[in-house]
Amino acid sequence: MSSRHGDVSNSDRDPDDLPVLKHAYTVYHYWMQHLPGPENDLDFKGRALGNWWVFLGDYDGAKERGLGLVAP
């Protein structure tokens, strides 16, 4: 296949040849599965953790509403 980046052929590439990308996906996957959600029963130094998914969906709106990562 020809592109502006030169000839690229990935059809015969083994996914294990890309350990950095594979590791990055694993870390991302783990991180996304372990973000505190609503009613998570987790705390940090005695303060309940909030729903961090709100920040991923609408960071500006969450900050405008005065939300934080932990309860006040």
Image (cartoon, rainbow, N blue to C red):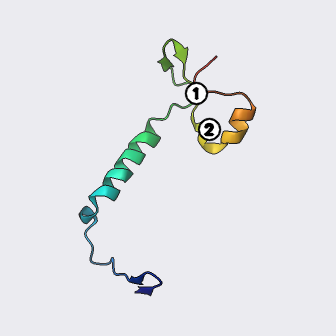
Give the CA distance from mark 1 to mark 2: 9 Å
Vertical side of 67 occupied by 24: above or below: below
SS class of the residue under badge 2? Answer: helix
Farthest right residue? Answer: 64
Farthest front residue? Answer: 5
Percent coordinates x, y for residue 55 in the rendering: 62, 38
* Along the viewing direction, whichever of 6 and 49 lies nearer the viewer: 6
Which amino acid, by three-letter code, is at mark 1?
Leu
Residue at 66% across, 40% down: 59
SS class of the residue under badge 1? Answer: loop
Percent coordinates x, y for residue 17 in the rendering: 24, 65
* Quarter of the image that includes the N terminus: bottom left
16 left or right, relative to 6: left
Percent coordinates x, y for residue 34 in the rendering: 44, 35
Mark sitting earlier along the chain (1/2): 2
Within the image, what quadrant is residue 16 found in?
Answer: bottom left
> Residue under circle 2?
55
Marks 1 & 2, CB-CB < 8 Å contact: yes
Vertical side of 12 occupied by 63: above or below: above
Which amino acid, by three-letter code, is at mark 2?
Phe
Q: Which mark is residue 69?
A: 1
